[in-house]
Amino acid sequence: MNAITHAALRSLRNATLADRYNFYNCRQNSEELFRQYYNH
């Protein structure tokens, strides 16, 4: 998991600003869904 995360972060350094923004939003949404799922 860490290796995948590090690779993703490395690739983000070369991504456009829009790509970084989209990645960040996707991650935030996933974490929010995760919290909602476990807060039933």
Image (tube, rainbow, N blue to C red):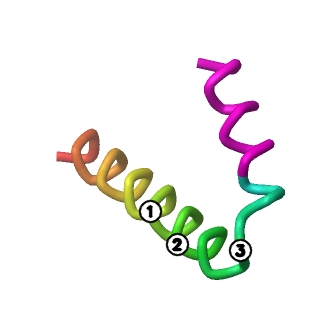
- From the top left corner, tell me how far across and down residue 11 is, in percent: 73, 47
User: Pointer 2: residues within 10 angstroms few (<14), some, or many (20+)?
Assistant: few
- From the top left corner, tell me how far across and down residue 26 is, in percent: 44, 62
- The residue labelled by disc 3 is 16
Q: How far apart in space, not on screen, are marks 1 and 2 (Cα)?
A: 6 Å
Q: Say above or below: 1 vs 11.
A: above
Residue kind at label 2, given as amino acid type: Asn
Residue kind at label 1, given as amino acid type: Cys
Do the numbered discs 1 and 2 sit on residues whose CB atoms are within 8 Å? yes
Q: How far apart in space, not on screen, are marks 1 and 3 (Cα)?
A: 15 Å
- The residue labelled by disc 2 is 22
Is 3 inside the magenta-drawn segment? yes
Which image quadrant for residue 7?
top right
Could you say whether the residue bearing mark 3 is in a helix, strand or loop?
loop
Q: Earlier in the sequence, mark 3 or mark 2?
A: 3
> The N terminus is located in which quarter?
top right
Residue beneath the point at 68% across and 20% down: 2
